[in-house]
Amino acid sequence: MQRKEIHSLLAWKNSPGRKPLLLKGARQVGKTWLMKEFGKTAYRNTVYIDFFNNLRARQIFDGDLKPLRIIEELGFITGESISPGETLIIFDEIQECNRSLNSLKYFCEEAPEYHIIAAGSFLGIALHENESFPVGKTDNLTLHPLTFSEFLNALGEQQLITAIENRKPRLTALVKDELSKYLKYYFYVGGMPEVALAFAKEKNFKAIRKIQKRIISNYEDDFSKHIGMGSSEKVIRLWNSIPRQLAREMKKFVYTDVKPGAKSRDYRSSLFWLIKCGLVHEVNRITLPHYPLASYAEPDHFKLYMLDIGLLSAMSGLDIEAFLDRDAAVFDHFHGALAEQYVLGELKALGDIPIFYWAREGSAKAEVDFIIQFGNKVIPLEVKAERNLKAKSLKSFINIYNPPMAVRSSMSDLGRGNYADCVIHDIPLYMISGLESVISQPPP
């Protein structure tokens, strides 16, 4: 398995202004594997501390937080020599030792020569954000589930990755059927590392579902652990409503879909916890598609997406036959919800890109799935199931706002066309990770 975040970690290692790195992400997205793999490939040795299982390590932080004392005692209990720049120090499950989280401030200020990566669950770290959190004293990186390209890598499909990265229509045409097949697999399997690796080994779809359901159950157990049984009931109810919410044509989140008669005030804190866990992504509606998009966001109007498309597929109860049947319109399930969930996941993995959506209500309803911001460019992005290029909502948006460019993503081939004075880029779903490169290319 390879993760593209290894390149971000190498850039962090070589940065002259490097601070201790806080690696965030939902449970089971592969943070521990990534840190250990980075230590193995980029350092002479690694000192790995798991605060959940290591009482002696937690006791080290009961005293003062002087970095040199901590380094000496960590070396003593692990039997490892810790050298600046040559040793990677890993603090895993850091939420189990709040003072170790606080110590990152002192390593930043007094001992920046030591290379430290700390990781923990989104929710566990969030619980300490008002308790001596080292604000401004850490670098930060968020790890998401495997992207489609990383999924292909785990399966050993390097030729398909090459076709995606080269973005040459003639090459892609030679493997289009294979790309479509593996994209359907990805819609079912998703990008949770344990699930993807199990699929790579055995291709057992029933076993995959069992692993996904166990992961979902573990998340629900976490709710009770961190916020108590009373509050967790509301969180689970909201969490379970997401597939229903995405099944609607207009996917704006509606609290009455969680429970009849429910109000925002009843479930807003539950939504907050799910977002903090990293288990859902909130995409707000904008009133106007102007730069900067955040200035036009409507906090009370939003769509919710899952962390991972495979988990959405499992929670929706989709059978594998719906994906493998050549005659089944798999991408039409839930009015394109799976395709939207997929694109959102790929966009999130690109980095800190502002992502919103646009909708017009009333008799002339219209909704553009995503409005994204690259630098100072504001770009509408319409996601279509299968090869449907009608994109009525996108054309309505273009007629109103006259954007210089727009994007359609579907199962149609790579290309570009014009509508009014707008250049419309057609990008296949399996190539959407290369969105920025495609729209940056000069006209032929």
Image (cartoon, helix red, strand yellow):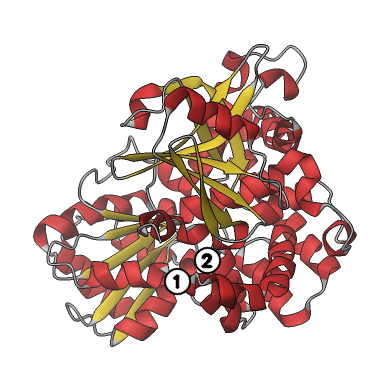
Asked if residue 51 is positioned above or below residue 84 in the image, the reply reads above
Asked if residue 16 is positioned above or below residue 187 in the image, the reply reads below
Crowd around label 2: few <14 · some 14–19 · many ≥20 (10 Å): some
Crowd around label 1: few <14 · some 14–19 · many ≥20 (10 Å): many
| Image quadrant assignment for residue 375 | top left
User: Whole-percent x and y of residue 216?
Assistant: 70, 51
Q: Which residue is mark 1?
A: 34
Q: Nearer the viewer, residue 86 or 64?
A: 86
Asked if residue 301 is positioned above or below residue 16 in the image, the reply reads above
Circles 1 and 2 in contact, beta carbons < 8 Å: yes
Q: Residue at x 12, y 67 (%)?
A: 16
From the viewer's perspective, is 427 left or right of 78? Answer: right
- Please, what secondary structure does the residue beneath circle 1 have? helix
Q: Nearer the viewer, residue 115 or 285?
A: 285
- Please, what secondary structure does the residue beneath circle 2 have? loop
The kind of residue tagged 2 is Gly
Q: Residue at x 45, y 71 (%)?
A: 34
Residue 121 appearing in the image = no
| Image quadrant assignment for residue 157 | bottom right
Asked if residue 241 is positioned above or below residue 316 in the image, the reply reads above
User: Whole-percent x and y of residue 263?
Assistant: 64, 13
The kind of residue tagged 1 is Leu
User: Whole-percent x and y of residue 315?
Assistant: 77, 47
Q: Nearer the viewer, residue 316 or 82?
A: 316
Residue 30's label in the rendered image is: 2
Q: Residue furthest left?
A: 110
Q: Residue at x 89, y 59 (%)?
A: 327
Structural distance between the alpha carbons of marks 1 and 2: 6 Å
